[in-house]
Image (cartoon, rainbow, N blue to C red):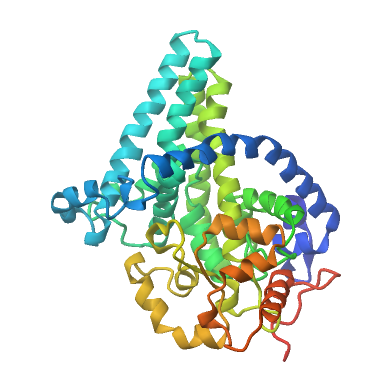
Amino acid sequence: ILFIFIKYKKGKKMLTVTTIFARYPLIRYVCALLGFLQMLFIGPMMGLTKGLFVFWFIYVNGAQDSAIFCHPLSNFSKQCARVYEQFVRYKEDVFCLNTVIAFGGVLPIFFFLIMYVTRVYELPFYVHFAMWYAYSFYRIGPASMHFAYVHTLCHKEGHTKLGIFKLKWLNNAFNWWIGLFYGLMPGTYSCGHSINHHGFNNYEGDLVSTGWANRDSLVNWFAYLVQWQLYHLNLTSILSFYYGPKNLRRFIKNMVAGVTYYWAFVALCYVLSGYNAKFVFWYLTYPMLEAMTFLSMVNWSWHLFLDPDDANNEYVSSITLFNGPSNVLNEDYHLVHHQYPAHHWTKHPQLFEKHQKEYVANMASVFQGTHALEMFYLGATGQFKKIADKYDRAYLPKDMTDEQLIELIKRRVQTTLFDQKGDLRPLTKEN
């Protein structure tokens, strides 16, 4: 893929990753096989951790987001508010400082302590497993809420130029320090995501576009997992910025620095651990594989649909979710985020209300009582009726029948940006 990405050009226009996946079935199926083989390992491990940690959230936290200490409305965050307000740009972000302390201070201490113990002492397998599982629980959190808040704040930090904190030395703490323990490559959010993904909005030039094939296929998602991994590692981002418009080349330095910095950290940990490859794999490589898998699922659901009549109709191509089990920093207003990527998360509800007429006019992809992972599962397995049951009918014609809605969903999930030959379709039916 990388060879074709670099060498194969049509005229003066380089083929994008999205086009390559659409045009070359062999590449797509090989990547699907690679993705499937990875999931044979990653799937059970994520079930063992993320899956079982859901029970803690239900039975200990009472399935309440605010019971998570890093939640903006948790009692702990409220108690710290008066002290922390002076350090953040928005008073609603006081919880971020607790998050930095918990996962930028305590988690690394936990990490290096385990590294020391595994280097000095010969321990039986069950002790190693117990340490890794306890570390994973603290890192991921009940129902993956620690994981969700860290990655969401990496995302938010990547979009802000001023930073979350008034203290300059704390800005970039999530992407350039905390993210290392969560499998995040520095530069992914600030460059690859903010510039490329938001620049193309899931269209053909988007390196993580879901539009090259129908989304009601697990086989296609297995291939998409590899597509996401190339992006997650900053490989396709660096190449696309280098071979793309010249004004994008200035961002390459940041991404190359991020890649170098990350792998230097991995190499340092390998040396400090006494050249312990197993420690590096389970505490650094596995979290990256976990993050790649989880985030690719989420993005598949965020962009599960395409308007058959207008591929650039953002009201269809980006979803909005209400009344789900969790809405981390209003990430479920995904369309609002694409329309206003730099706006603070507290502004999303009012920005949603601002465009109500457009949501109704476009029969926007708005759903009730669900979450991104459920939407991924229902979409990738083609359960159109269950998706229809989740649809917010306030944004549909009153006379639309259940059968018509199911057909609409099916068309939107199966519509692609390309024809069977791999050539880009017209943007709208009119042109």
191 w.r.t. 309: above or below: above
In the displayed image of the protein, which residue is found farthest to the bottom?
430
Q: Is residue 89 visible?
A: no
Determine which quarter of the picture holds residue 343.
Answer: bottom left
**Residue 364 rendering spot, x and y as whole percentages:** 55, 79
For the residue pair 106 and 11, the one nearer the viewer reads as 106
Residue found at x 41% / y 43% = 57
Q: Quadrant of residue 318?
A: bottom right
Marks counted in the figure total 0
Identity of the residue drawn at 48% across and 55% down: 189
Q: Position of residue 150 (x, y in %)?
A: 41, 47
Left or right: 199 as drawn, with respect to 210? left
Tell me, yes or no, if residue 355 can be seen here: yes
Which residue is rendered at x = 42% and y = 44% of the image?
58
User: Farthest residue toward the top?
Assistant: 122
Query: Is residue 292 shown above or below 355?
Result: above
Which residue occupies 60% across, 69% down?
389
73 relative position to 364: left or right: left
Q: Position of residue 268 (x, y in %)?
A: 47, 27
Q: Position of residue 306 (x, y in %)?
A: 66, 74
Q: Is residue 255 above or below residue 344?
A: above
Q: Quadrant of the C terminus?
A: bottom right
In the figure, 230 relative to 109: above or below?
Answer: below
